[in-house]
Amino acid sequence: MLAFEIWKNGKKLAVTGLTEGGAMSLMLTWVGKGAGASSRIADGVEIEGLDLRVGGIDSADPASEQSVEWIEDTALRLDDDIRIRIIATEAVDAPVRREPTTGLASAATGMRFTPCATCGAPRLQTAAAPAE
């Protein structure tokens, strides 16, 4: 199966993958607050507002899709080395968090997340309206 091998500073954090359908995403995000937020970053100190997240939507059972997460790392510093290797493997790590999708996406509402054919990002789809 397709998988992402995630490394931080030479240490493997996780091998992520979904056995059936779904969507996986990796996000490295920084949200700076206040004037000069970027210039306040110091060497050797965790960078406030910077995090790495690896997760997705497991669509193995379309009637009960699940939100999954393998990595939520907020302990990032200057000179951290984050590497992502795209691999094919038979075995992946279990997500550290798995929970049913909620809100708009549910079998009861006829809406669900499916991966975008172009980029793979989760897209909300609605069921076709019943014929009258």
Image (cartoon, rainbow, N blue to C red):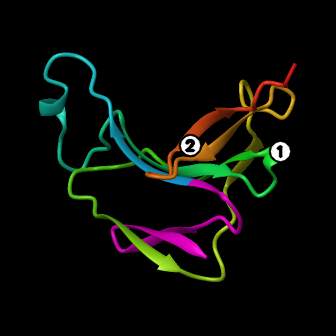
Kindly identify which numbered label has been placed on residue 98: none
Residue 58 in the image: x percent, y percent? 69, 53
Left or right of 52 on screen, residue 77: left
Q: Residue at x 87, y 19 (%)?
A: 132
Residue 38 in the image: x percent, y percent? 16, 32
Quadrant location, the N terminus: bottom right
Residue 74 picture quarter: top left
Three-letter amino acid code at the position of disc 1:
Ser
Assess whether mark 2 and mark 1 are in contact (beta carbons under 8 angstroms): no
In depth, the one of 43 and 82 nearer the eye is 82
Left or right of 116 on screen, residue 10: left
Q: Residue at x 44, y 52 (%)?
A: 118
Asked whether residue 120 is in view, the answer is yes
Range drawn in magenta: 1-23
Q: Residue at x 18, y 48 (%)?
A: 43
Secondary element type, mark 1: helix
Q: Which residue is mark 2?
A: 122
Q: Which residue is mark 1?
A: 64
Relative to 99, say whether 48 is above or below. Answer: above
Outermost residue toward the front in this view: 132
Residue 81 in the image: x percent, y percent? 28, 63
In depth, the one of 15 and 58 nearer the eye is 58
